[in-house]
């Protein structure tokens, strides 16, 4: 009897399991469904949306107006089934909040329904408003002209209530037709996901916005047919044509899908049971991809989820194909059969994270892997979710990668300008403090743009004077006439370069000093800010490995900067793309060491680190002895305060050199320069551009390429011009150091001091004559020189220039450096 009782119990348990796995599968702990502006409850499928008259404890603005219409959304719209919810709306003319009591913390969906109808004298398409939840901006200055939409977000709610705030813009109002706050099953969004570059991103505290949720096979799946009430739209409109022909074929076999409870949460059977397939009938289409195209905002990272399920005919022995997003290969030879341990019809989900760096589209493709002769490819479903940025926003790209490349990101630009002005203000304040103290000595000049700088100082923002410079080449304001004379009226024959800022000319001053004259052309705010930053930085920081400022000119709206002349030009030109003789390995190492010194000085030479932000081979210049000097400080920033670890800024820099961590977090530290320096090191080693579209696809991106090459194939990446002379040990040390610079996480990257040490080692291993003793004393001299020559910022405010250059200080500093190097 006992035994049969036990059996009975097991049977009940099984029945329970079965019924729970066969029925909805998931019961949300929190399930707020609100039909806004309605006086009655409405049912959609088996879900009851409560009138907000009956949920007044949730809405903290009882004055919100209710509005209704009789017109329905188009019957062809997937939102037609929500018609009853969409016919009413709540209007807010002041900031209004919904406050939800959360039973179970963790990820929650927030779904906002918008249908901008016209009712009486109210036209909802005129509404302009922002929506935020917890501390995340969901919508910023949102407006909707027509149509209807469900905006879906998922947030990790970490307190016992969730506040949803609607903020109308000035002279406008906000509206909402319906909303949901619903628990998301824990399994749905993993806590971390690999990026296309095989780095790992944590998602725990990031909010997500569903940008696309698509069912392949061109069939829409309504929220009523999904256990988690998700809407899956048909893929037809996103399919890309190949010479006017759609390549994919829609297939369907729902009975072949073997669902489990977990897969039910990922997507319903109706998603896995349909697919768009390539190469269905061993046809001529075998060697193309099937692709879909989606519009996305640049400046964000996206979680991309591919849903696969092998529902096609068994006559295909194996289904093995490649999976792409844009040109990144997310998976090579994806073999669903293997990945699901041979269980027929079992769903498989693949997640990745990518950012559409320089476009506003994602092209999702599956295609032949060349591995198997007979190649088919399949995709059953796809989701694209935008990941909130470090500022907690999903609707304000703080992104100004390269204004030439991404011109339509006004918000980012403005953010960048504001940040720039702030920095200018900080700098100006510093400078003013300095001026006050050194008024007797400083050559204070007024600038006519003073008022544009947004700083209240009457005194000039620049102190460019002879204070503290041991060099006779002091920086000051040059008359335009002198510059015209020096450059033969900007004669084209004297033009030696073209930068983002403007043209560079070679010139000769009256005292026969050769100079480089950079003439800004961009009259933009940004150009002005960079002009200012460059002068401010260079007049404060002098070092033999930083290019020296000789003077500037701002007459007649000119933005001209005069530098010491660097005879051998840019490092870049000596590596590739020009007729110049190539540098030897030793020369390359010395150039590396020189520029590392310059950066090390920037990072550690004063209280606050200076972050260069645009380290690249085009910004490293060589003098007649091939000594390297770092140039172009237009983007530099003062680093974090002692108690902070980073500064937050709009992302700037050069494509290919940008620290991925900075790109995603917008948090700038010296380690962003270290990353770029790592890229420079590989560029120097390989003698090729960072991005070279003319090369075979796998080689286009230098860093991806060298990362893919095993470290046992070192020679394969070395520039052919130097491969003969490189000592393996030296090469190992060098590559190991460069590798570390490229660590995903800034904290794991070495300091410039550390890099310097390792580069010196690499030089030693190459068979360098300089003894360790010599090297130490030379670097010490180098450092104390730099102190002598520098006008420090406020740190040593009590000291005169002599104190700053004093022995004690330079000893302390040299000590610090050596400790750093260990
Ligand atoms: C709407 O639903 C709420 C909550 O379930 C209930 O209290 C209320 O009576 C319902 N109203 C109508 C008109 O059915
Ligand atoms: C909208 O749909 C409802 C019910 O689905 C119907 O009663 C109403 O007449 C429709 N309105 C219009 C303008 O067609
Ligand atoms: C939500 O955030 C908390 C606290 O940061 C974290 O412990 C938890 O893992 C997160 N939950 C999810 C589902 O990411
Ligand atoms: C997808 O389905 C829609 C509606 O059923 C149809 O109009 C469209 O032509 C289909 N797309 C393709 C590519 O067949
Ligand atoms: C669907 O799959 C089942 C199980 O593999 C198979 O028996 C059936 O023939 C398939 N249906 C079609 C239309 O291919
Ligand atoms: C479905 O998958 C389970 C394992 O997840 C397996 O035990 C079962 O046999 C499969 N059913 C069919 C019909 O293949
Ligand atoms: C498929 O797309 C990828 C990425 O764009 C591309 O590299 C590959 O060559 C394409 N394959 C075919 C067969 O066109
Ligand atoms: C938002 O709040 C959560 C929890 O309070 C915190 O972990 C997260 O860092 C905050 N995000 C931002 C962008 O402030």
Image (tube, rainbow, N blue to C red):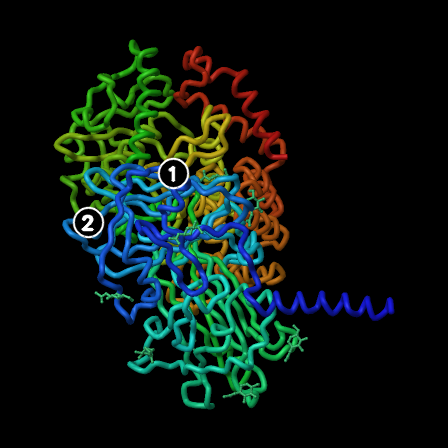
Residue 200: numbered disc = none
Q: Mark 2: give few (<14), some (14-19) or many (20+) Cα within 10 Å.
A: some
Q: Position of residue 364 (x, y in %)?
A: 41, 68
Few, some or many residues within 10 Å of mark 1 (<14, 14–19, 20+): many
Closer to the camera, 450 or 773?
450
Q: In the rendered image of this protein, does residue 717 appear above or below residue 208?
A: below
Quadrant location, the N terminus: bottom right
Q: Secondary structure at mark 2?
A: helix
In the image, ligand 2 is in what quadrant? Answer: bottom left
Image location (x, y in percent) of residue 499? 28, 46
Q: Which residue is mark 1?
A: 649
Residue 73 in view here: yes
Q: Residue at x 52, y 86 (%)?
A: 374
| N-term mark: 2 or 1 | 2
Measuring 59% from the left and 32% from the top, which residue is drawn there? 820
Quarter in which the C terminus is drawn: top right
Image quarter for residue 757?
Answer: top right
- In the shown orientation, is residue 649 left or right of residue 261? left
Q: Nearer the viewer, residue 501 or 175?
A: 175
Residue 749 location in percent, x, y? 55, 43
Label 2 belongs to which residue?
A: 126
Q: Secondary structure at mark 1?
A: loop
The image shows residue 404 at horizontal and vertical percentages of: 27, 51
Q: Is mark 2 within 8 Å of ligand 2?
A: no
- The residues tagged by marks 2 and 1 sit, at their Cα atoms, a distance apart of 33 Å
With respect to residue 40, does 80 lie above or below?
A: below
């Amino acid at each position: 009897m006992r035994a049969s009782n036990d059996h009975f119990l097991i049977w009940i348990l099984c029945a329970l399991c079965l019924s729970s796995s066969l029925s909805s599968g998931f019961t949300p702990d929190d399930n707020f469904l609100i039909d806004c502006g309605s006086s009655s409850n409405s049912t959609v499928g088996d879900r009851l949306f409560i009138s907000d008259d009956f949920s007044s404890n949730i809405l903290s603005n009882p004055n919100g107006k209710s509005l209704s219409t009789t017109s329905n959304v188009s019957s062809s719209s997937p939102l037609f089934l929500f018609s009853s919810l969409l016919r009413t709306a709540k209007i807010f003319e002041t900031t209004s909040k919904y406050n939800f009591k959360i039973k179970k913390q963790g990820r929650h969906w927030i779904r906002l329904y918008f249908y901008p109808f016209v009712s009486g004298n109210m036209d909802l398409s005129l509404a302009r408003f922002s929506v935020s939840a917890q501390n995340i901006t969901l919508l910023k200055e949102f407006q909707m002209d027509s149509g209807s939409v469900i905006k879906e977000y998922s947030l990790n709610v970490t307190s016992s209530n969730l506040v949803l705030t609607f903020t109308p813009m000035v002279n406008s109002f906000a509206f909402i037709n319906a909303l949901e706050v619903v628990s998301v099953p824990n399994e749905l969004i993993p806590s971390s996901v690999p990026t296309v570059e095989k780095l790992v991103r944590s998602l725990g505290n990031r909010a997500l916005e569903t940008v696309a949720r698509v069912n392949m096979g061109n069939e829409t799946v309504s929220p009523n047919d999904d256990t988690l009430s998700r809407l899956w739209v048909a893929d037809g409109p996103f399919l890309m044509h190949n010479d006017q022909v759609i390549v994919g074929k829609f297939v369907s076999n729902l009975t072949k899908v073997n669902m489990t409870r977990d897969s039910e949460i990922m997507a319903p059977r109706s998603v896995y049971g349909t697919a768009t397939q390539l190469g269905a009938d061993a046809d001529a289409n075998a060697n193309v991809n099937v692709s879909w195209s989606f519009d996305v905002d640049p400046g964000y990272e996206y979680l991309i989820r591919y849903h696969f399920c092998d529902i096609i005919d068994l006559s295909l022995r194996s289904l093995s194909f490649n999976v792409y997003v844009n040109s990144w290969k997310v998976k090579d030879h994806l073999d669903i059969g293997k990945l699901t341990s041979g269980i027929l019809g079992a769903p498989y989900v693949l997640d990745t994270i990518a950012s559409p760096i320089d476009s506003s589209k994602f092209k999702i493709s599956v295609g032949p892997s060349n591995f198997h002769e007979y190649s088919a490819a399949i995709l059953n479903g796809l989701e694209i979710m935008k990941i909130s940025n470090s500022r907690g926003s999903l609707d304000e790209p703080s992104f100004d990668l390269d204004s030439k490349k991404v011109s339509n990101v006004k918000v980012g630009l403005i953010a960048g300008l504001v940040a720039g002005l702030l920095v200018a203000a900080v700098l100006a304040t510093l400078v003013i403090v300095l001026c006050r103290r050194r008024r007797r000595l400083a050559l204070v000049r007024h600038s006519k743009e003073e008022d544009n700088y947004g700083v209240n100082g009457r005194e000039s923002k620049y102190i460019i004077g002879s204070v503290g410079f041991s060099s006779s080449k002091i920086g000051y304001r040059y008359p335009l006439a002198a510059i015209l004379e020096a450059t033969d009226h900007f004669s084209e024959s004297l033009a030696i370069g073209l930068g983002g800022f403007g043209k560079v000319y070679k010139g000769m001053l009256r005292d026969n000093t050769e100079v480089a004259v950079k003439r800004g052309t961009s009259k933009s705010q940004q150009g002005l800010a960079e002009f200012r930053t460059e002068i401010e930085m260079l007049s404060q920081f002098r070092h033999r490995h930083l290019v020296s400022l000789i003077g500037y000119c701002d007459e007649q709206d000119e933005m001209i900067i005069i530098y010491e002349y660097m005879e051998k030009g840019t490092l870049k030109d000596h590596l590739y793309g020009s007729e110049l003789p190539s540098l030897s390995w030793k020369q390359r190492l010395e150039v590396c060491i020189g520029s590392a010194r310059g950066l090390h000085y920037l990072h550690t030479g004063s209280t606050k680190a200076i972050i260069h932000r645009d380290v690249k081979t085009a910004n490293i210049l060589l003098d007649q002895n091939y000594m390297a000097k770092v140039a172009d400080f237009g983007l530099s920033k003062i680093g974090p305060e002692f108690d902070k670890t980073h500064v937050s800024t709009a992302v700037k820099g050069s494509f290919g050199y940008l620290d991925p961590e900075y790109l995603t977090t917008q948090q700038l530290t010296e380690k962003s320069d270290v990353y770029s320096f790592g890229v420079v090191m590989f560029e120097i080693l390989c003698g090729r551009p960072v991005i070279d579209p003319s090369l075979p696809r796998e080689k286009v991106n230098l860093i991806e390429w060298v990362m893919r090459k095993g470290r046992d194939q070192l020679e394969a990446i070395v520039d052919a011009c130097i491969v003969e002379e490189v000592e393996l040990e030296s090469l190992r040390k060098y590559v190991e150091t460069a590798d570390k610079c490229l660590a995903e996480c800034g904290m794991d990257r070495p300091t410039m001091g550390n890099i310097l040490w390792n580069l010196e080692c690499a030089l030693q291993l190459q068979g360098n004559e300089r003894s360790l003793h010599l090297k130490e004393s030379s670097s010490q001299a180098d450092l104390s020189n730099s102190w002598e020559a520098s006008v420090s910022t406020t740190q040593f405010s009590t000291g005169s220039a002599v104190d700053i250059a004093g022995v004690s200080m330079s000893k302390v500093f040299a000590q610090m450096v050596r400790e750093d190097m260990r």
